[in-house]
Amino acid sequence: MVSASTWAGTTLHDRRAARRERLLDAGLDLLGTAGSSAVSVRGVCRSAKLTERYFYENFADREEFVLAVYERVAGQAHQALVDAVPDSRRAARERAEAAVTAFVELMVDDPRKGRVLLLAPITDPALSARGIALLPSFAALIRDHLPARMDPVEQTLTATSLVGALANLFTSYLCGALTVPRDRLISHCVELLS
């Protein structure tokens, strides 16, 4: 006997999860290409080819949705950096190169993600506070790989400074204000971090 919540071989839970993913994908596309002003409930639903009913099944309003898109990209960026440097015994330059390459692959090779993570918090009030709140977690990733000879305060100051510098560098690159080859961008970032 087939469960009432199973349709075409998928459960209600799986269908809801798939619709949520379609909405988030549409949000990434809209926020990451056309910017904050393009993200409306109606626009997202049209792009995802879903009705507003399914939007509100997953999100209370536009702000919650935009935050979910942002959190998804921020989580991917954080995980890419963590995965890139699983072994802290590697040389500092190797760790820096692995982390920068992973970040570039995520944020520059798919510039929509870079724009969502770095540019959207500047233009969308729903993301401003969250963007600021995430900075310490990214600074901690850098701080954990700074030389042990530095005192903890110096490590925190240096890591925070590097996050700011790298964010501005990638923002300029994504906006087209900085036109350098991809490999030059990577090597410059590695120099900053090692």
Image (tube, rainbow, N blue to C red):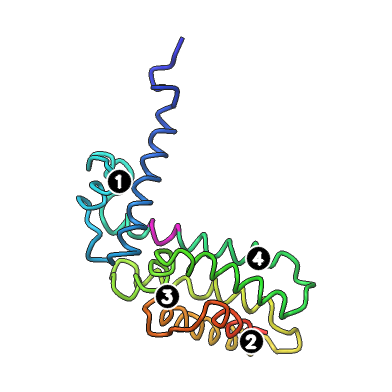
Find residue 133 and report its horizontal and vertical position in percent. 44, 72
Q: Residue flagged by tag 3: what amino acid is it?
A: Ile
Please tell me which of labels 2 and 3 falls first in the chain: 3
Please tell me which of labels 2 and 1 falls first in the chain: 1
Please tell me which of labels 2 and 4 falls first in the chain: 4
Give the Cα separation between the discs numbered 3 and 1: 29 Å
Residue hosting label 1: 48
Location of residue 50 by image quarter: top left
Give the Cα separation between the discs numbered 4 and 3: 24 Å
Q: Residue 171: which disc?
A: none
Please tell me which of labels 4 and 3 falls first in the chain: 4
Residue hosting label 2: 191
> Local crowd at mark 4 within 10 Å, few (<14), some, or many (≥20)?
some
Please tell me which of labels 1 and 4 falls first in the chain: 1
Q: Secondary structure at mark 2?
A: helix
Q: Residue flagged by tag 4: what amino acid is it?
A: Ala
Report the front residue among 149 and 46: 46
Asked if marks 3 and 1 touch (Cβ < 8 Å), the reply is: no
Residue reaching furthest front?
Answer: 181
Give the Cα separation between the discs numbered 2 and 3: 25 Å
Asked whether, in this view, residue 52 is left or right of residue 7, the answer is left
Residue reaching furthest right?
Answer: 89
> Local crowd at mark 3 within 10 Å, few (<14), some, or many (≥20)?
few
Quadrant in the picture for the C terminus: bottom right
Find residue 189 and report its horizontal and vertical position in percent. 58, 82
Tag nearer the camera, 4 or 3: 4
Asked if marks 2 and 1 touch (Cβ < 8 Å), the reply is: no
Location of residue 35 by image quarter: bottom left
Seen in the picture, residue 131 relative to 156 is either above or below; the reply is above
Q: Secondary structure at mark 3?
A: helix
Q: Residue 132: which disc?
A: 3
Residue hosting label 4: 84
